[in-house]
Image (cartoon, helix red, strand yellow):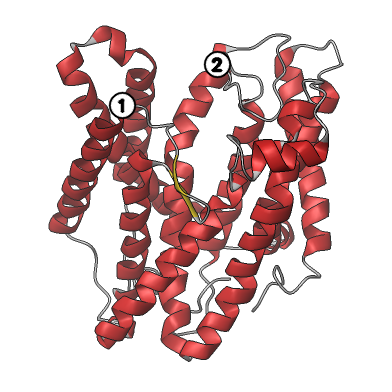
Amino acid sequence: MSEASSKGKRIFFLDNLKAFIICLMIAFHIAMSYMQYAPDWWYAVDKAAPQFSFTVFVTWADIFIMPIMFFISGYFGISSLSRQTAKEFWLSKLVRILIPWVLGVLIFAPLVTYLVFLTRQVPLPFMEYLNKVFFFGPLFSHGHYWFLGSLFYLYIILFIVVKIKPSIKEKLTPSEPGRLFFLFIAVLSYVLTFAAYYMIGGNNDNWSKLWPIFLYQPTRVSLYVIYFFAGVYGWRRQWFTEKGVKFDPTIWIPAFLFTGLFYTGFALFGQAAVESASYLPVKSALHSLFVMASVFGLLALFQAKLDYTNGLLKALSDNSYAMYYSHLGLVMLVVWLLTGFAIPVYIKYLLACVLGLAVTYIVGRILMFLPFFTTKA
């Protein structure tokens, strides 16, 4: 849902950016099935012709997808809290976030994770898998529903902060973020990212958990908090109203492209190219700078070029949450189905993306009849 401006205009470019990120997430998860050295635990892997190009794409896209989601969530989260009573706010989060998260973890995450064995023809009875491997074993996971859990915790933190300082719910005079704002984001992001890299030895794919209620990636979780509250700050400063900020795409889009190029190259080849003492400081800096350039670069691009809607864009935007919720198991089934076809891998990937997006869209439209996924004006 988008917030209306003072004149009632929806912020269409945030709707469109959210829908784009969900579609990119689907393409990203499919690409993981075709990359070189795909993780052993990945749900469906096509080993016919793994390609390094998919590894490059996965390394690049993996960094910025979720920070943008948290930024948008923070922007609209404080908007909801400002115009609703506490009861209304938490009722909406119960229906839209908490219940889908719990159902996802208890019902759908086990089913999706079982694909690890099903797609590899490993004979493992489902009930034995549930008891010994998933819920009380080494593969317990929230699946992609970890985002909903993290988001719910951030709403709790936001609610507490607002209780302590109620003025946070009030809009300030529209103003652009200055250099100090971006310097603060850059320095804080770097310090926290470097600390996390250092503690876990440099692996930004590492997952940690407070079983069973919180799963997170140490090198990324601080960035999610930062950009969630950057979204809160942006709402207070009325960035996306008519008198608000226009992020300059001629600055931010090149920054997005260049930091993405440098981060991806360094993540893939840097460990062999630099001294070990320099690796973590440089990777942490590139990681945090790439995230900042990605968030504001894509905001600038969509604000400049996609601040409108039409039938297709509205349909994707309305359906984006349900597509996110349902996509992972569906697209992994598509990948598994296509493993038996001897066709060039790039054609197979494009076909998997088209079929995966189509199936996810259709299932998402069906899910929109449920109260968890209905679109509110």
Q: Which residue is mark 2?
A: 53
Which part of the image, by quadrant, shows the N terminus? bottom right
Residue under the image location 51 percent in, 69 percent down: 11
**From the viewer's perspective, is residue 349 above or below residue 22?**
above
* Res 72 seen here: yes
Quarter of image, res 159: bottom left
As drawn, is 368 to the left or to the right of 181? right
Q: Nearer the viewer, residue 51 or 277?
A: 277
Dot 1: what SS?
loop
* Residue 275 picture location, percent across and down: 18, 11
* Res 84 seen here: no
Dot 2: what SS?
helix
* Residue 144 picture location, percent across and down: 59, 46
Residue under the image location 58 percent in, 82 percent down: 91
Which residue type does callout 1 highlight? Gly
**From the viewer's perspective, is residue 362 above or below residue 271?**
below
Q: Nearer the viewer, residue 53 or 212?
A: 212
Other residues around mark 1 within 10 Å, as few (<14) / some (14–19) / many (≥20): some
Q: Which residue is mark 1?
A: 202
Q: CA distance from mark 2 to mark 1?
A: 23 Å
Which part of the image, by quadrant, shows the C terminus? bottom right
Mark 2 vs mark 1: in front? 1
**From the viewer's perspective, is residue 136 above or below residue 72?**
above
As drawn, is 224 to the left or to the right of 31? left
Residue under the image location 50 percent in, 52 percent down: 305
Residues tagged 2 and 1 counted as in contact (Cβ below 8 A):
no
* Marked residue nearer the N-terminal end (2 or 1): 2
Other residues around mark 2 within 10 Å, as few (<14) / some (14–19) / many (≥20): few
Q: Nearer the viewer, residue 113 or 232?
A: 113
As drawn, is 83 to the left or to the right of 218? right
